[in-house]
Amino acid sequence: MKKVITYGTYDLLHYGHIRLLERAKALGDYLIVGVTADDFDKTRGKINVQQSLIERIESVYATGLADEIIVEEYEGQKIDDIIRHEIDIFTVGSDWVGKFDYLNEYCEVVYLDRTEGISSSELRSDKRELKLGIIGEKNLLTKIVRECKFVNGIDIIGICGEEITLADFHLNDDTFITDDFDSLLDRCDAVYIASHPETHYVYAKKALSLGKHVLCESPISLKKEEAQELFALAEAENCIFMESLKTAYSTAYSRLCLLAKTGIIGQLVSIEATCTSLREIDNLDEKSLKNTWNSMCSWGPTAMLPIFQLLGTEYSYKNVVSNLVNEKLMFDRFTKIDYIYPTAVASIKVAKGIKSEGELIISGTKGYIYVPAPWWKTDYFEIRFEDSTNNKRYFYQLDGEGIRYQLVAFIKSVEKSKSYSCISKRISMQIANELEDFYIQKLNKININ
C-alpha cells in the first residue's frame, strides 16, 4: 500500500483545497492529511485564520478524501510523521517548490500545481473590510497602525489626534487625519480608542451610541458603573465592545494560565506581578502630568490580569500604598497592592520612573510558574519544581506584542456578531473598579524621597 501525506491550514475550505486533496489522493492508496494547529500557524505568520482547528478538521473530514487526519503542532514534525507512518510520498502545492526538498531523504516529494485564481487569503480579503478609525496619542497610534497592516479585513479610514500628520504613519493619501472625534465617527464602522484613560468612557459611549464597534485600551473606564453602562449600551446597539489588553492575547500567556488551572503546580497560593518602566516624570508640570498616563492606568490592568483570571475577583481584603508625584491628580510614581483571598494572596507592583524586575511568579503547592521580564510580552515561561529535573520550558511565537492578535479577535467578533475577547466583562468591570478605588483615594499614601 502506497501512503501519501500532505499538510495545510485548510481555512475556509474551497475548491482549490479540494482539487489539491483529490490529486494527492490519486498519488497513492492511503492519504493522511495534516491540519496545522492554531499555535503553529502563528509561528508561520498566519494570524488571521478565520476558523478554529476543529472547524478546519471537520471541513477536511467532510470531503471524504482523507483516510486519516492528524494535527501538525511543531517545527520538524513532518519528518517525524513520515517516519512514524512509513510514508511513501509527501506532496504539497507548487507555491512551495524547493521548500521541502530536504524531505527527499525520507520519501518522494511531489509538488502539485495549485488551482489558479482562488486562495483562502483572497477569500478573507474579499470579505467586506472593516473601516476602522483610531484615536489616541502619537506613540501608541504608531504601534497600532503598524500592526493593522498585518491583519486582513482592516481598512484604516482615519486617525484622530493632536499634532499628527499622514507622514507619521506611512499610510496612503486616502486616510483621513483629524483632531475632531465626531468627524472620525462619521466615516468609520469601528473605532480603536487609545487616548488618555480619562477620555475612554466619553469616547466609547459616543461611538457605541452611534452603532460603532469599539476596541478600547485598558482601562475602559475609571468607574465600575460606567464600565457596566458601556457593556449594556453595546448590547442594546448590537455592537462589539472589547477591552484592549495585548498580554491577554499572547499564546504563551494563555497557555500558562491554562496550565495553572489544570493543577500542574498544585493549589495556587500566591501570584506576584511586577510592571515598571523608566520615564522622567519629576520635572513635568501639572499640565503635562494631566496628559500623561500614571502608573496605575499604564500598568495596573496588565498586572491585575493574571490575578483576576486565576484567583477571581472576589478577594477578601486589599491594601494599597502609593508614592504620589501629584496628589491632586492622583499621579503615582509607584503603587503596590496586596490582595488577600480566602486561600491565596497576590500582589502587584507598578511604576513609572522606577525600575524593578518585571517578572510574573505564580506559586502553588507542587511548584511554580516563572515568567521572566518583561512578562507582559510573554513568549516563554518555565514550570519549576522542587526536583529541577522535572522542570519544563515552554516557547511560543509572539508577534507585535500581541496587538495584532487582539485585532484579529476584534475583526472576528464583528464578523460573527459574537465576542471573542480574551478578557471577560467581569474582569473588565473589576479593573475599572480598582481604578475607581484608587482615584477616590481608598489607599494609604506614603512618600518615598
Image (spheres, grey):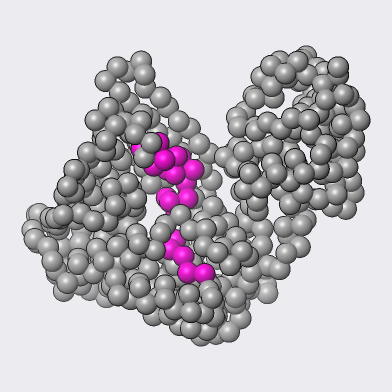
Question: Magenta region, mostly helix, strand or loop?
Answer: helix
- Residue 291 percent coordinates (x, y): 32, 72
On screen, residue 148 versus residue 382, left or right, reads right
**Residue drawn at (44%, 61%) of the image:** 244
Which quarter of the picture shows residue 196? bottom left
On screen, residue 260 versus residue 158, left or right, reads left
Question: In this picture, is 399 found above or below 404?
Answer: above
| Pick the front one: 287 or 52 | 52
Q: State the count of labels.
A: 0
On screen, residue 150 versus residue 59, left or right, reads left
- Residue 314 percent coordinates (x, y): 23, 56
**Residue drawn at (42%, 50%) of the image:** 247
Which quarter of the picture shows residue 333? bottom left
- Residue 179 percent coordinates (x, y): 49, 81
**Residue drawn at (52%, 49%) of the image:** 400
On screen, residue 287 versus residue 60, left or right, reads left
Q: Is residue 335 visible?
A: yes
Q: Is residue 293 visible?
A: no
- Residue 186 percent coordinates (x, y): 58, 84
| Pick the front one: 366 or 61 | 61
| Pick the front one: 47 or 167 | 47
Question: In this picture, is 415 found above or below 306?
Answer: below
User: Magenta stretch: residue 265 in it?
Assistant: no
> What's the magenta region?
240-260
**Residue drawn at (19%, 66%) of the image:** 438
Quarter holding the N terminus is top right
